[in-house]
Structure formats: C-alpha cells, structure tokens
Amino acid sequence: MSDDLERWLRDGVRPTEFPPAPPGLRARLVELEQRPIGTRRRGPWKHSLILVPVTAVAILAVATLIGGGQKPSVSGPTSGSSAHDVGSPSPTIPSSPLPTGGIGESRAIELASVNSIGWTLIAASAGRYGDLKPPGSGPGDDIPPDRFVWAVKFASEATICNPLGVCMSPRPGTVTVYLDYFTGTFLSSAGFSAAGPTPSAPSPPVTFSFDVENRSHVPVIVSVASDTGAVLPGFEPGQRGTISIPLLNPRNGVSIEVEGGECRLLASGNFPTPEPFTLLVEDGPESGTVTISTIADASSTPIPLPSNSLVGCGG
C-alpha cells in the first residue's frame, strides 16, 4: 500500500477505490511530506508549492474513506428566518405571512371579550380575512378578503329564529369576533349553531269562557282582554251571559274592566285562567258605583249574551 500511496501523491492521480485506512496512515503522510524532493523520482514542482496541495488531497481522501465515500454535509442559514440542511426540503412558507405592527393575541382577546359576558374563549387566529371568514358569508359581507384581521372565537348559546319570528330554544353555538389586525377596531361578528329539528307550529288558541251576572242597578260594559283578543259585551241590570275569548296560553289569565256611561271606569282586575268562574257585578257604596268579585262556579253550557244597546269604548 505504501508504494501505491506514494505514487498517487507523486503523480496527483486519485484512485477509484481505497482499502480501509491503516492505523499508521497519518504518520506515513507526514513521512512522505518530509522526504527530500530529490528522492521523488519525478516532479517538476518546487517543495514549497507541492506541500500544501498534496497534503490537502490526502486529507480529503482520508475523510472520504472514513465517511463511506459520501460527500460531507454542509449546513448553515439560508435566506429567510429559518435555517435548514442543504439538500433537505425547503421550510414551508405561510401563504399569508403576518405583517409587523399588529396588536398581540392577548390584546385581541381582551378587546373581543368586551361584550362576551358568559362566553368561553376557544381560540384566536390572525391572518387575511378571506382565510378566516365564516362559511356562507354573502354579498353583505363588505370586509376585503386581503385585509389582515384577528378572529377571536367563543363558545356561547344561540337562539335561532326563522323569518316568521318563530324561535327555537337556546342551543350551544359559537360566536367569532373579527377585529382589525393593526388597531383592534371591531369589524364584525358571526354566530354559528346547529339548527337542530324544525320547531313545531304553534298550537292554535284555546277558548276560555266565564259567566257574568249584573246584580247592580247600573248598566255596564264588561271589557275583557286576553293575550290574543278582546271583547266588550254590555249588561243591563239583571242580565247575565257567558263571555268567550281566545287564549294563546291557557294560563295567561284575562284582564277585565267594567265601564259605566261615557266610558267611565267603574272597576277592574286581572283574573287567572283556565278554571271557569262567574263574575259578579254588584252595587258599590255610592250611587252609580259597582264592585266586582268572582265565584268558582259557572254554567255547564254557555249562556247567550244578552241583547241591548250598550256600546263600550274599547280603549
């Protein structure tokens, strides 16, 4: 091996294969470098010129042998903020890198939480609005898609109502608040909740009925109002009859006003439903006045309303 290596160093020819480096290889290199130049048989170069290139080639050959014939890797920073090994995939660059000068995440959450009492923070993200906007945004969404925003998302309860005003019970949902990335100015908010089952149509009104007896000496108008309607039948002294009125909620009760001539209010009260009762109109302590009371009793069949010329004011 010594003769081959000496010939390689002398002629500057790199062999294609090397056997494993012997333990005394480096000592042999030093010995060869120190040999007087005249003993190298051939070589037109001066000693001062051959020493450095020959030594460098030999050391590179040894490094190649030790490394299994592979070129040593070189690492170092590349252009951009991330460093990576040569030959490895380039680092992923965000499609919308954030500009400098924006407010921080904690400040964005603080500003978005001003009107979020009872909400629970889920996440905060920054980027272009077009990448963060809620699904299904329509033409009314006038925020430019390239505008940088903070999107702060909260868990909340949502009440969904259809165009007819029929609302479903509150259900879990989310609300996302969008703020300007640089100033934190509120831009918009969007809520989302699973619609769930379609609400059933409201129940039709029920009819509530009660009896009236005018035991006083005063002609009266009995004005009755419910959660969905009103009636104003008149009762001369001694007359009686059954008043029927629709109710959306059978337990909402009714309001009753008893009027005299010229729309003069004589008595009033609120009365519970749905249990039937009889309203009694009796003379008051002074002439032309009445009192009202009820008894827990009513006729089993409706009593026709009396016929008379009494007309109520209705207001």
Image: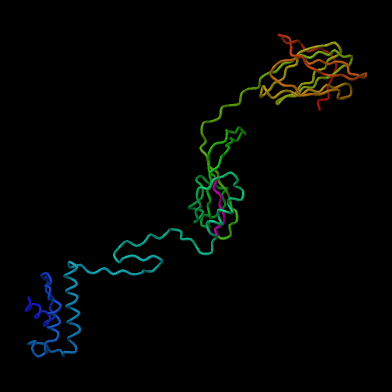
Where residue 91 appears, as percent x and y from the top left, is 36, 61
The residue at the point 15 percent across, 89 percent down is 45
* Quadrant of the image containing the N terminus: bottom left
Which residues make up the magenta segment? 175-181
- How many numbered discs sit on the rendered protein? 0
Q: Is residue 302 left or right of residue 74?
A: right
Query: Considering only vertical position in the picture, is 141 above or below 213?
Result: below
Residue 237 picture quarter: top right
Where residue 15 appears, as percent x and y from the top left, is 11, 74
Q: Is residue 275 left or right of residue 69?
A: right
The residue at the point 59 percent across, 36 percent down is 161
Does the segment drawn in magenta span residue 179? Answer: yes
Does the segment drawn in magenta span residue 226? Answer: no
Pick out the residue farthest to the top.
Answer: 300
Residue 63 picture quarter: bottom left
Considering depth in this image, is 72 or 36 the residue closer to the camera? 36
Query: Considering only vertical position in the picture, is 131 above or below 163?
Result: below
Query: Considering only vertical position in the picture, is 167 above or below 229?
Result: below
Magenta-colored segment: predominant secondary structure: strand
